Image (cartoon, rainbow, N blue to C red):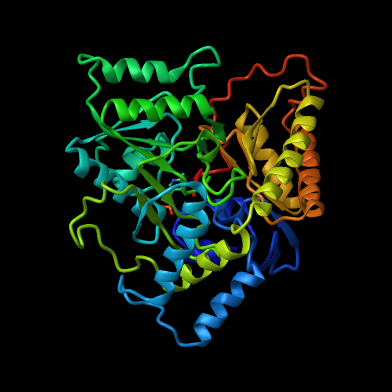
Amino acid sequence: MQAVKALESNVRSYSRSFPAIFSRARGSTMLTEGGRNVIDFLSGAGALNYGHNNHQIKAAIAEYLASDAVVHRLDMATPARLEFMETFSAFILRQRGLQYRFQFTGPTDANAIEAALKLSRKVTGRQNIVSFTHGYHGMSVGALAASGNRFHRTGSGVPLSGATFMPYDGYLGPGVDTADYLQKVLMDESSGIDCPAALLVETVQGEGGINVASKEWLQSIQALARNVGALLIVDDIQMGCGRTGEFFSFEFAALSPDIVVLSKSLSGYGLPLSMLLIKDGLDAWRPGEHTGTFRGNNLALVSATAAINLYWRSRTFSQGVQRMGELARRRLEAVASEYGNSFAVRGRGMALGFDCQMAEIAAATTCKAFEKGLIVERCGPVDQVVKFLPALTIDSKTLNQGLEIFQESLAEALIQTGSDPKKETSWPTRPSNMRSPSRSSPSP
Ligand SMILES: *Cc1c(COP(=O)(O)O)cnc(C)c1O
């Protein structure tokens, strides 16, 4: 790790939280150069929903490469590109009664968010974007303007403008419907909030702390967007591709977003691939208006097609994810109840969060977990939530092993930080407003 420190910019972050050199990986396990096997509950922040080096997807990539098929060709048409769009339309869209056009953007998720924001401004002729407290949409300036995290916002170096933050579902406590507030200010000609081009929302906030929006709230937000002539953009970058149990995270609420942003696990193999799904009639782009060198890389399209064919042609996979998610959730709830429910468990499907309430407990827990052979990350405004994103293809034995390590690590962390609620009556009284000093960069 000394060599990494000498060569790589100070901006690196995950190599600090998980100080090892990772040489190989398969499914839910990674192997370090030191010969240690570690279970991966981070899954590339949700980019590896089908596990590392998924053999069946790899076979499709290997076959494509071996045939000398076209890998890079800007956005010229190829059989791989066509096959992806046809397969996605048949097994993802049509099966759900959805109809969208595809826009492949530059390979980062943030570039897809930029495209979505541009398009909604273009379509409506308005500038303001309504985004939500604790929302995370990426690091480029436009996407960052719609992201809440102050640490990241400060890094921009220029004023971040064009977005208004509204309270996410639950932000003001269980008694307040924040959609009512949003309705009030958007309908009020003198609220000081400009008419939005779009409402940009995650149905479960990943980086923001695994905050879960309810079906009713999401439906209110969608209705409100329609009422005020704004587009509804769902950022399904982290929560899409099966993470919450269904392919799209908004299916449970029967939403029909105007634009859906997909990336992270879209390629199925950790290859970069980002795209927008755009409703018919909203495709207002002029040819080449949002361009980029690496839009819809063919290798990533081949693996994305393979992933759909493997997992999404029937409901079986989705049902399995939901079952496994239930299992994990029950186990985490059992751990929380051991501590008199001082901790909260949140999430949907296989996106789960264990809110330690205090940053130092979460930090000590994930640090100990790594020593014991588990990669698990933190999220939330002060990194106080331990975030579980196991591969959707994980077997129950490995899942339980990982959860066992988490449970032991939490118990030790509570002793180490002197905050075991089983033993102390005064807990929790310390404010959770301190970022743990060991972590200098909180998000992907
Ligand atoms: C990861 C993520 C992004 C940004 O992705 P990059 O590839 O890092 O640009 C945007 N939105 C959500 C919800 C994400 O999880």
143 in relation to 111, above or below? above
Q: Position of residue 306 (x, y in %)?
A: 56, 68
Q: Position of residue 204 (x, y in %)?
A: 53, 36
The quadrant where residue 76 appears: bottom left
79 in relation to 313, above or below? below
How many marks overall?
0
Q: Position of residue 84 (x, y in %)?
A: 45, 66
Q: Name the residue rendered at 40%, 46% in the picture.
A: 260
Residue 156 in sight here:
no
Q: Is residue 148 left or right of residue 361?
A: left
Q: Nearer the viewer, residue 174 or 335?
A: 174
83 in relation to 434, above or below? below
Q: Name the residue rendered at 64%, 71% in the picture.
A: 56
Residue 45 in sight here:
yes
Q: Nearer the viewer, residue 253 or 97?
A: 97
Q: Nearer the viewer, residue 345 or 188?
A: 188
The quadrant where residue 35 appears: bottom right
Q: Name the residue rendered at 49%, 71% in the picture.
A: 302
Q: Nearer the viewer, residue 117 or 310?
A: 310
